[in-house]
Image (spheres, helix red, strand yellow):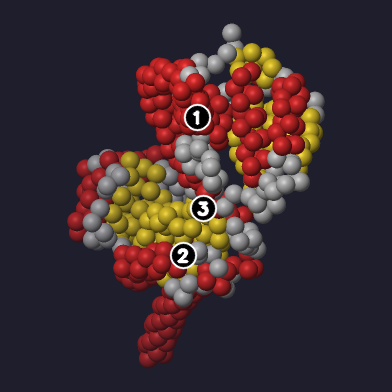
Amino acid sequence: MVKKNQKNKQLVSQLSNFSKHNEQLSEQLSYASALNKIAETIISNDNTSDILETMVAIIGSTLNIDRSLIYKIDFAKHQIIDQCEWLNPNTLNIVSFRDTYNLDVFIDSCTFMKNHRTWLETHVDNYGSCFLRDGSGDVLHNYMNIKSALYYPFSFHEQEYYCLTFDQVNQCRAWREEEINFIASVANLVEIALQKINLLSEQRQNQEALRLSEERFYRVFHYSPVSMTLTNLDGKFIDVNQCCLKMHGHSKEEFIGHSPSDLNLWVDIHERAKFFKELTENGFAYNHEIKSYKKNGEIFDSLLSGVVIDLNGEKCILGTKSDISELKQYQRELSRLNSLNIIGEMAAGIAHEVRNPMTTVKGFLQLLSTKSEYQKHENYFNLMVNELDRANFLITEFLSLAKNKPIDLKILDINSIIENLLPMIEADAIINEKYVTLELNQIDNVLADDKEIRQLILNLVRNGFEAMSPYRILTIKTVMQNGKVMLVIKDQGKGIPPEAFDKIGTPFFTTKDCGTGLGLATCYSIVVRHNSSITFETGTTGTTFYVSFNAASSVNHV
């Protein structure tokens, strides 16, 4: 009987040991499964906000804890910042404690874990020294109603670390070595997860920064008011903006994949060589004044810059070009006006001093020519008087160039002035075997000086007659255009040569054999004094001058 009882006790002991072994094995399998799920979450999940949430749920359910959290302990910001939280659905009256806390509340315990890199636990019946010193034990157990808590620090950096937090709210809990070992393994995986989250976050930030950078570049490139191009190092166009297309007149399809040489954009190959030499040597070339072709063959002045950039890992040339034709025209106009002003001031200064002796000489010549003894020299006297008259005419033209010449402004009808001048113009046309036609439309009055407008019209008409061969027609036209009164004088001559465009209106410049070069200069001066504008168009079939006046109704005057 005694032997039988001993055998029964041995059997019960063996069964008990076997049961414990099975429990331990089951627990280890549970931990291994949890660690495997956590690893799979890290590998397969790229949703940064979901990774930690999934992990704390796996950890909390595996340990059968009431609440599990991950905090970031930030000494630089002096804060305890929650990262994620899991609440056990089977725990009654469980509440969330996700929040950011002032580090001062838990300063002793947090500093201890930072310095010693070890875990801490606290219980309602045994706070622990750290939680006693800073008073956090009362906060945890009396205010938050936590029975037991374990804090496991990991992922240490200079001013921060992370902490796995486990709360038991309904009963105290003693932590076994196996559970601590499991938590240590979990902490290693969570650190890996945090590294992945930081990497993913950095990648997304970089991708967003790249997207924003590309978007900004796209907007700057395509909506720039300056012509912009992208070419590879072989000189082929990769992309061009709308301003470039408009400037040159080519389509985008004609640009892409072709070089400037293919499209014949450069006028001077020496300018091209100089630009690319500087670009190659320095990696950039700024503000080269060049001449460029449009698709229709028109030449225009431009300012070209370029810089070598890295675009998506490929070296490219970003080029910018500005059409400076108008600027150059303004510069030429300013130079011409300065010339007019200087000559006008000189003329005003010497005119009277020259005219007085000339008048005396002319008077004595006319007096002597009446003497009988000089009759045989009458032709010489007439020649000298004519030359003096010509000199006096030049002085008068000189004075017309003066910028500050006083003018008598009145409300005038240009059509009436033209009609009054028509007999004189027709007589001149008949003498020169030319024809003149009028196209006078209804126009507004202008505020102008009558004598100067007459001189303007006569000078332009005479220039037109002199430019035409016999039996050609000169047209005088008036019209309203964009609220301006337009005087248009069109001849059927040979046109003005391109090399003379920049000099038109400059004193003493003329394309005529016997011209003085003051007629058009006087016209330009008159236009300036009337705050008007003058332009011209020319070709092989003739030249047209356009003079634009402000209507009297739009002019502020006293």
Gap in angstroms between the C-alphas marked 2 and 1? 64 Å
Quadrant where the N terminus lies? bottom left
Residue 362 in sight: no
- The circle drawn on residue 499 is 3
Which-is-in-front pick, marks 3 and 2?
3
Which residue sits at x=46%, y=60%? 319
Quadrant where the C terminus lies? top right
Q: Amino acid at mark 1?
A: Lys
Along the line of sight, the residue nearer the viewer: 381 or 141:
381
Q: Secondary structure at mark 1?
A: helix
Q: Are marks 2 and 1 in contact (CB under 8 Å)?
A: no
Tag count? 3
Q: Are marks 3 and 1 in contact (CB under 8 Å)?
A: no
Establish if 256 lies above or below 213.
below
Residue 513 in sight: yes
Establish if 149 lies above or below 417.
below
Crowding at label 1, few (<14), some or many (≥20) Cα neighbours within 10 Å? few
Q: Name the spot of residue 442 as percent of width and height, x first.
A: 80, 25
Give left or right: position of 511 versus 317. Answer: right
Which residue is labeled 1 in the image? 376
Gap in angstroms between the C-alphas marked 3 and 2? 16 Å
Crowding at label 3, few (<14), some or many (≥20) Cα neighbours within 10 Å? few
Sequence-wise, the earlier of marks 3 and 2 is 2
Which residue sits at x=52%, y=68%? 260
Which residue is labeled 2 in the image? 268
